[in-house]
Image: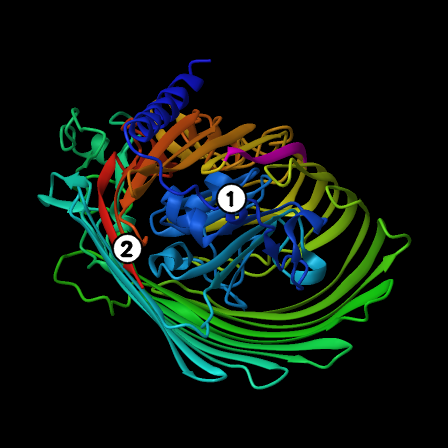
Amino acid sequence: MRKLGPIAIALGGLLASASYAQAQSDPAPAADANAETADIVVTAQRRSERLQDTPIAVTAVTADTVQKLGLSKISDIASVTPGANFTVSAGFFSPNIRGLGVAFTAAGLESPVAIYEDGAYLTNTITANEFLDNFDIGSIQVLRGPQGTLYGRNASAGVIIINSADPTDKLEGRVRGEVGNLDRQQLNAMINLPLGEDLALRVSGGYKHNGGFIRNLTTNSKNGWEKNYSARAKLRWTPGAADIVLGGEYYDLRNTVTRTGTLGRNDETCLGCVIAPGVVSPTLGFYEQQNESYAPPAHTKFYGATLKMTFDLDSFLLTSTTTYRRQKTLHNGGDTDMTPLPLFEYVGADVGGKTFSQDFVVASQLGGRFEYLFGLSYLRDKRHFRAAFITSPTQDDSTTDGFLNSGDTSSYAAFLEGYYNLTDQVKVTLGGRYTYDERGMRGSAYGFPWGVDLRATQRAFTPRFVLAWDNGPTNVYYSFTRGFKAGGFPDSQLSPPAVVRPEKIASHEIGIKQSMLDNRLRLNAAAFYFKNKGLQAQTIRDVTQGGSVTSSANLENYGIEVEAQIIPMDGLNFGLTGAWQHPRYKPFDGVIGLACFVPGAGLVNCDPLVTNLTGTPPPQAPTWAGSFSANYDFAVGSWTASLSSLATYRSGINYQPGAGGNLRYDRDGGLFLANASGYVSPPGMNLRVGFFVNNLFDNKYVTRRQTLVPFGTSYNAGLPRTYGLRMEYAF
């Protein structure tokens, strides 16, 4: 009950102020209820259909929801998605769905949550969290559970689909600016230009600056700041039965988010504290650190191009999607020992790669009892990772002390899915995908006697079966799905890596989607059970091993997810999500790199001591999680106004398998966060002036805890309370 108190206070305050304002003014025209109760269209099954008709656990977030709830990052989408836990720590976006995810991706190992941005599969997620910076979003969909048939490899946990807005045939534009504490400054703009009867151009761009919030007492500076630029353009041509969209995008990101770590324990577990007693202040504040860091700020450049062509050929739609993405990050480094001592300064001197993909999808539109979907996919990915060790502030990143890894992937796939209506209300879906991968890795370490050139091939068949009964307001379904996550070779290594085998998942799901009261109440629920074999468990080992990955674990999970939308009256909208799960390693009898504390010896590598984590939960998998949101649109005389609140809660989580070792430092307790926002608008709705407050109660929380042999423990602090004003003009 104590956790519900802050939620009730936040919601009650917002609604009370809204009701008072409405009572003191003359009534304005009622809000358009049709927009709130309209059907939501999704493409979770690679064709457009009503959300309530889709037999998949999917959360759809519209551009209006993003704006009203103040969702400024892709990671914020998890706050309205049951069963999802998205985190960002040290610059890495780590999505986790139903207990499956990774802390960081590598050249040969991707996330089990596949991310598609305007049709492009993203092999590297380091910039994914910034896509909402370019505010011209069309829709975001989160598919929970394996999606191996329709979305292929690396979708064993789920899929995030991000679609930017397409050009329209109307002249329109939007400009939005924000200012806030911590030196927040943001400016975004969009313009849509009809260029002819069947041609239109849409251009958007933005600038964002956030100041640092971690005070470094050693360098007398602040870390955690970011300065981002983004631009996107889309040209749409619709001649006759064709719809052709050519798009391009660019992101330039500079930040020190990789340097926000703070020493966790100033005791025998801290190597620097033992070597130089008194070197670290015993009174460090929560947002303070004493790290030494020689690396320049991280700098990432991201380029993307997409050509999507859809042709209506009467009995079927033919869609071709061609994508190219390229990314390069320089100076992504930090201080491993978290003390003023120059024990281990590192920098990712050159991290990046490029990806090309080509997809063809044929979607029937026969109009009878039988429909089908057929597709072919090809992906070519090349990535590299060069790290260097820095021993002085004048040393150049081109130092030969470090290692270089590069990886390449060629993936080929074909899928076929059929849908047959046994009756007007009962439909059977049966399909499968065959995937063939070729992967390679080359690596060498300067100053170390090794070099590798590894190759591997992988094959997988991922079927899907769905039985659904849908009478309109009620949709009940059962699905069985297999998923496949590619194996590979973990990079960030100072010694020859072991090949990591693919992991495979078999999932059962029962769901219900219910619409009532003329769509004023939507209630969707899903119960699932899955077993993942050959789970690629990941942890951070000591500095001689880098990232450690083993595929000797199995994971079993079952749970229930619920989401609801309630519209008790025009203008008032409530959202509710809740999830309970029970993920456990079953079995996990392999050795994984963990850290042990031995009195008199400090931290040591305890691999020989920890060989069985069976029965323990995986990282980033809270047992309980939920959220509550409220939005109220009302009148103030001839003006309109809107107030929104969003509160989220999750129970405790591990950040690494086994919570990092016998210290169990790599664990965090429950977390509650609340946000609030609102705006007022004069007649016409062209101008909006509003406010936002995130982390309303200024809770101190962490985004990651880590125990690292031999240096000690550290944590990354989450943002304190942030607030500011925003103004938007649209025409």
Place residue 152 in its image quadrant. bottom right
> Where residue 511 appears, x then y in whole percent?
73, 39
> Where residue 684 appears, x then y in whole percent?
31, 54
Structural crowding at the residue carrying mark 2, measured as other residues with C-alpha within 10 Å and reported as few (<14), some (14–19) or many (≥20): many
At 34% from the left edge and 38% from the top edge, which residue is drawn?
635
Above or below: residue 280 compared with residue 122: above
Q: Main secondary structure of the magenta part?
A: strand
Report the magenta residues as a range.
557-569
Residue furthest to the right in view is 422
At 55% from the left edge and 53% from the top edge, which residue is drawn?
141
**Render colour scheme:** rainbow
Q: Which residue is mark 2?
A: 333
Q: Secondary structure at mark 1?
A: helix
Q: Give the mark nearest the N terminus, 1 or 2.
A: 1
- Quarter of the image with the C terminus is bottom left
- The one nearer the camera, 694 or 253, is 694
**Closer to the camera: disc 1 or disc 2?**
1
Place residue 164 in its image quadrant. bottom left
At 28% from the left edge and 68% from the top edge, which residue is drawn?
400
- The one nearer the camera, 425 or 448, is 425
Q: Which residue is mark 1?
A: 33
Residue 650: assigned label: none
